[in-house]
Amino acid sequence: MEKKKRVAFIGPIEPFRSGVAKHSNQIALELCNRADVELQVYSFKRLYPKILFPGDGDRDKYLRPPEQLGAKFWIDTLNPLTWQKVIVSIKRSNTDIVIIPAWTFFVAPCLGWISRALRRSGIHVISIVHNAFDHEAGHIKNVLMKYQLLNSTSFVCHNQSLADDINQVIETPKIVITPHPIFDQYPQALGELKKRANLELLFFGIIRDYKGLDILLEALSQLPDDIDYHLSIVGECWSDINQYKNQAQALGLVDKIEFVDRYVSDQQAAEYFHRADAVVLPYRSMTGTGVIPLAYHYQKPVIATNLPAFHEVIKQGKTGFIGSAVSATSVAESLMEFTHNCNTDEMAKHIVDYRKMFSWQKFTENTLSLGNL
């Protein structure tokens, strides 16, 4: 019998709530189910201080840690003694491979320090890079994120744009590009939300400036009167939500928009995606997003701005539409094309076929393959 690989996974898992936590949770479960892997999971007892997480806490009260993972919730991002505890535990276990996500400047010192110590001990450290640089970048933030990357052995990323970012930091890095898998742990919708218009649109997730909600609102103001639409904006706002509410009022959109300015449970999210005809991503910048895999899970097309990473996961006219630019006018044009020229049932069939490419098994196999380099 082939010797099992001793793998340690370090990252936020349930009950932490974020796209990275859901991604990490599914990777850990996939690794746990593999016959060729002996897995240890280390997560956080404190991830963010309240001041850095403007929302209603960073844990989902409806979720529990998966029992089969036997995760050790040891890491305090502000306490280096807990970092050392994890380092010692992994070394004593004769671990072959450590897999760690990279996604935000705040956890980079902690995860970079752990990576550095393990790599110096001859352990292969694989970074799953969700972001190489901060979306709302500052010099110090990007220096911290660079620190974690520099202390990794190899890298997994979801698209070429991220790979290009890593190449700016690391000379001749070992990289595997493998698309963000489709989430398969979300519940089925019960159909509790009734349609309010012919075209139901959804903007979903934490609201940050780079996600371009203001672009979407301006685009809606450019739509002709014959398009009967309603937009649901669902997610916590990490800036001032009133700037968007005031913009909607100034543009005369109040009657066509619903603000759900809070974190919603997975079941509630299912209802919003079920009601939507399309999910809109009017982003100013993007190196990866969990919203598209979630939209595809519910067989919903996406409408996005013209960013390189979108071209790798959206089939034009089949699984969604990419505009001609990053602008309100291009988003409006895509919305009109979707409304007048698309059959949503046909697009759902294309999405079902397309999402077969994005499995967690394939993602995990590609990740583990780096350990052989």
Image: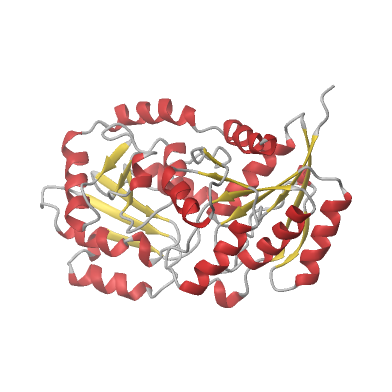
Q: Position of residue 122 (x, y in %)?
A: 78, 49
Q: Quadrant of the C terminus?
A: top right
Residue displayed at 42% across by 25% down: 353
Residue 55 showing in the rendered view: no
From the viewer's perspective, tell me whether residue 315 is left or right of residue 103. Answer: left
Identify whether 64 is placed above or below 105.
above
Identify whether 249 is placed above or below 277.
below
Residues 166 and 46: in front is 166
Which corner quadrant of the image does residue 278 belong to? top left
Q: Residue furthest top?
A: 1
From the viewer's perspective, tell me whether residue 249 is left or right of residue 235. Answer: left
Q: Quadrant of the N terminus?
A: top right
Q: Residue furthest right?
A: 92
Identify whether 48 is placed above or below 335.
below
Residues 168 and 212: in front is 168
Residue displayed at 20% across by 57% down: 328
Q: Position of residue 42 (x, y in %)?
A: 75, 54
Q: Position of residue 253 (x, y in %)?
A: 21, 63
Residue displayed at 81% across by 45% down: 95
Q: Position of residue 108 (x, y in %)?
A: 61, 64
Identify whether 318 is placed above or below 233.
above
Residues 255 and 3: in front is 3
Residue displayed at 41% across by 64% down: 207
From the viewer's perspective, tell me whether residue 7 is left or right of residue 111. Answer: right
Q: Residue furthest front?
A: 171
Which corner quadrant of the image does residue 88 belong to? bottom right
Residues 285 and 220: in front is 285
From the viewer's perspective, tell me whether residue 141 is left or right of residue 30. Answer: left
